[in-house]
Image (tube, helix red, strand yellow):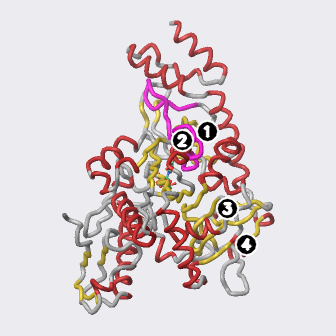
């Protein structure tokens, strides 16, 4: 009774006493669970978050056209227009940073993958490659290969630390998957998993939802949750102890991701950037992706819905879109900048509202699985810290080489397993042809990352040879 009274008093203060509605029906174990859930909520903070996020809904429908300008050309370079010599300099610098152990990868793998409709973490997804490798495996093997390339180039054996941000929903399965696959040949000590924070889900009036009678409905706090989690899980300290100075942060669902891309790292390090965004050119003014630009003089990602059609269609004298820099959740951060964000800016980050169908227990105690959005999840976005620095860069890369996202089930027809697979096949077929091989009877081509990181190292294997699709080219020691 004492616990109940204490909880009630706190909850009443924040207008959330409905969370105790089923208290008398709960076993003592369940009462303890609910007590823990409520005590873990920072009610003062989360109710303030709800208000701030709710107020921002109005801002989100306002168009930003008059306040926007493209990224200045001095802070925008493109792979396609950079000379081979300069690319090689960037690459060399990136490989040296890797060889010195200065580079870490931050994989964002805490999302729930609701559009894809899987119950396990997206990184475990078998996309249907001939090798049946998962997204995690492909990425882990790219890291292994890059460590090897860096050692060959520099004579130093450096490690890339792989930081993996999971959430309550993905942590256990991710850890077990990595253990079952022996960390894909990486040193277990160089794979560091941590959990992002959770926030309660609210109904539209600001009442926290119950997932069951004894559990509050919680959801991950968005990929922008990394800044708080990096500090609270000791990752910034770990980076410092290992000497990691540069982080390549990216989403789990891009099959073409160039993990720890040495060219990108070299570009950012050589220009002493605090942070940077890899971007691809928007395919058309109407493509629903955020654009990297400046708003009121600060760097920002502006969502498609925040620009009028007229501005989206604006063209430069060379015929490209003025606001062409499509954001692909692929970023560089210096450790120094991450520390300053975690220490000084994290609580100024914008809060975004996602209206979702959230399972909940209704006032009659019946668990409902709504068919229409019934509440909101509050999310922070990783890119909302660009505004905190001027030392920001943009690196544009060819989409066909570096970006194909897995968001939806095949029925959507885009950004789905089928398109992701085909984009990889197309790229790898091109690698074979560029190295002097011939592919016939189809387009299915997969080259193991353990053999080639980005198309290099293939001519001695494929030159003058004819391959029949489906093609799977492995590294000689792959099955040993
Ligand atoms: P998305 O916003 O596309 O979300 O995440 P999602 O979870 O993959 O898919 P939906 O929206 O539920 O269908 C982009 C990247 O950010 C990560 C995801 O794992 C993905 O790599 N992410 C997202 C997190 O790490 N944490 C989050 O809270 C949300």
- Is residue 186 in the magenta section? no
Rendered residue at 45%/70% (across/down): 154
| Viewer-side residue, 434 vs 363 | 434
From the image, which quarter does the C terminus lie in? Answer: bottom left
Q: Quadrant of residue 7?
A: top right
Say which label, 3 or 2, has the lower sequence index: 3
Between marks 3 and 2 in the image, the one whose residue lies nearer the viewer:
3
Q: Which residue is mark 1?
A: 204
Q: Which residue is mark 4?
A: 311
C-beta proximity under 8 Å, tags 2 and 1: yes
Q: Which residue is mark 2?
A: 374
| Label 2 crowd (10 A; few <14 / some 14-19 / many >=20) | some
Q: What is the distance, in whole Å, between disc 1 and disc 3 at their CAs?
A: 25 Å
Range covered by the magenta-colored residues:
208-234
Q: Quadrant of residue 208?
A: top right
**SS class, disc 1:** loop
| Viewer-side residue, 427 vs 32 | 427
| Viewer-side residue, 119 vs 255 | 255
Q: Position of residue 55 (x, y in %)?
A: 72, 43
Q: What is the distance, in whole Å, between disc 3 and disc 4 at their CAs?
A: 12 Å
Rendered residue at 49%/60% (across/down): 100
Q: Position of residue 454 (x, y in %)?
A: 41, 75
Say which label, 1 or 4, has the lower sequence index: 1
Q: Is residue 141 left or right of residue 325?
A: left
Say which label, 3 or 4, has the lower sequence index: 3
Q: Which residue is mark 3?
A: 302
């Amino acid at each position: 009774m004492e616990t109940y009274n204490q909880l009630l008093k706190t909850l009443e203060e924040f207008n959330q006493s409905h969370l105790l509605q089923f208290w008398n029906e709960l076993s003592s174990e369940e009462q303890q669970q609910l007590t823990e859930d409520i005590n873990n909520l920072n009610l003062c903070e989360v109710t303030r978050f709800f208000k701030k996020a709710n107020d921002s809904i109005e801002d989100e429908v306002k168009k930003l056209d008059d306040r926007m300008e493209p990224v200045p050309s001095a802070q925008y370079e493109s792979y396609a227009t950079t000379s081979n010599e300069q690319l090689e300099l960037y690459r060399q610098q990136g490989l040296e940073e890797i060889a010195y152990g200065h580079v870490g990868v931050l994989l964002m793998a805490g999302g729930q993958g609701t559009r894809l409709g899987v119950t396990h973490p997206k990184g475990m997804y078998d996309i249907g490659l001939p090798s049946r490798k998962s997204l995690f495996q492909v990425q882990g093997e790219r890291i292994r290969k890059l460590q090897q390339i860096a050692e060959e180039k520099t004579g130093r054996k450096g490690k890339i630390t792989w930081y993996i941000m999971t959430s309550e929903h993905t942590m256990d399965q991710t850890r077990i998957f990595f253990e079952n696959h022996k960390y894909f040949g990486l040193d277990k000590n160089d794979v560091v998993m941590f959990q992002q924070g959770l926030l309660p889900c609210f109904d539209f009036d600001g009442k926290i939802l119950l997932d069951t009678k004894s559990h509050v409905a919680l959801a991950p706090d968005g990929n922008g949750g990394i800044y708080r989690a990096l500090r609270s899980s000791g990752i910034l300290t770990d980076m410092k102890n290992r000497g990691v100075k540069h982080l390549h942060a990216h989403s789990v669902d891009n099959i073409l991701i160039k993990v720890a891309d040495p060219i990108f790292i070299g570009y950012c390090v050589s220009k002493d950037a605090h942070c940077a965004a890899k971007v691809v050119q928007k395919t058309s003014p109407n493509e629903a992706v955020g654009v990297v630009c400046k708003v009121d003089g600060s760097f920002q990602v502006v969502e498609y819905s925040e620009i009028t059609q007229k501005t989206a269609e604006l063209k430069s004298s060379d015929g490209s879109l003025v606001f062409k820099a499509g954001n692909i959740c692929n970023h560089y951060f210096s450790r120094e900048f991450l520390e300053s964000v975690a220490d000084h800016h994290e609580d100024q980050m914008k809060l975004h509202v996602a209206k979702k169908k959230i399972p909940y227990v209704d006032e009659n105690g019946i668990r409902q699985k709504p068919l229409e959005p019934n509440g909101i999840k509050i999310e922070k976005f990783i890119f909302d810290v660009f505004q905190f620095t001027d030392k920001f860069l943009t690196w544009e890369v060819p989409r066909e080489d570096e970006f194909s996202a897995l968001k939806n089930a095949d029925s959507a027809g885009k950004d789905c397993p089928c398109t992701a697979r085909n984009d990889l096949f197309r790229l790898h077929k091109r690698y074979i042809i560029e190295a002097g091989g011939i592919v016939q009877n189809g387009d299915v081509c997969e080259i193991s990352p353990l053999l080639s990181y980005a198309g290099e190292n293939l001519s001695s294997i494929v030159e003058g040879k004819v391959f029949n699709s489906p093609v799977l080219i492995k590294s000689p020691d792959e099955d040993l």
